[in-house]
Image: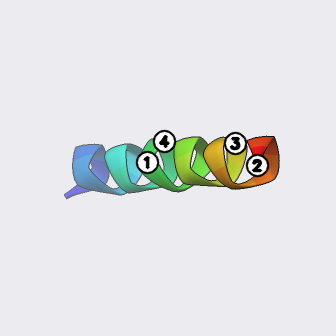
Amino acid sequence: MFGTAILVQLLEFKLDKDFYRI
C-alpha cells in the first residue's frame, strides 16, 4: 500500500515535468 503511494507520487511528478516541458 505504501509502495503504491510512492509510485503514484513519482508518476504525478513525471506528468508534471512533461506538462511544464511543453
Please tell me which residue is depicted at 48% across the width and 42% down the height of the picture: 10
Q: Earlier in the sequence, mark 2 or mark 3?
A: 3
Q: Name the residue under label 1.
A: 11
Please tell me which residue is depicted at 76% across the width and 49% down the height of the picture: 22
Q: Which of marks 4 and 3 is nearer the N terminus?
A: 4
Q: For marks 4 and 3, give the one nearer the viewer.
A: 3
Q: Name the residue under label 2.
A: 22
User: How far apart in space, not on screen, are marks 4 and 2 (Cα)?
Assistant: 19 Å
User: How far apart in space, not on screen, are marks 2 and 3 (Cα)?
Assistant: 9 Å
Q: Name the residue under label 3.
A: 17
- Mark 1 and mark 4 in contact? Answer it, CB < 8 Å: yes
Residue 2, disc:
none
Q: Name the residue under label 4.
A: 10
User: How far apart in space, not on screen, are marks 2 and 1 (Cα)?
Assistant: 17 Å
When asked about the image quadrant of residue 1, the answer is: bottom left
The amino acid marked with disc number 4 is Leu
User: How far apart in space, not on screen, are marks 1 and 4 (Cα)?
Assistant: 4 Å
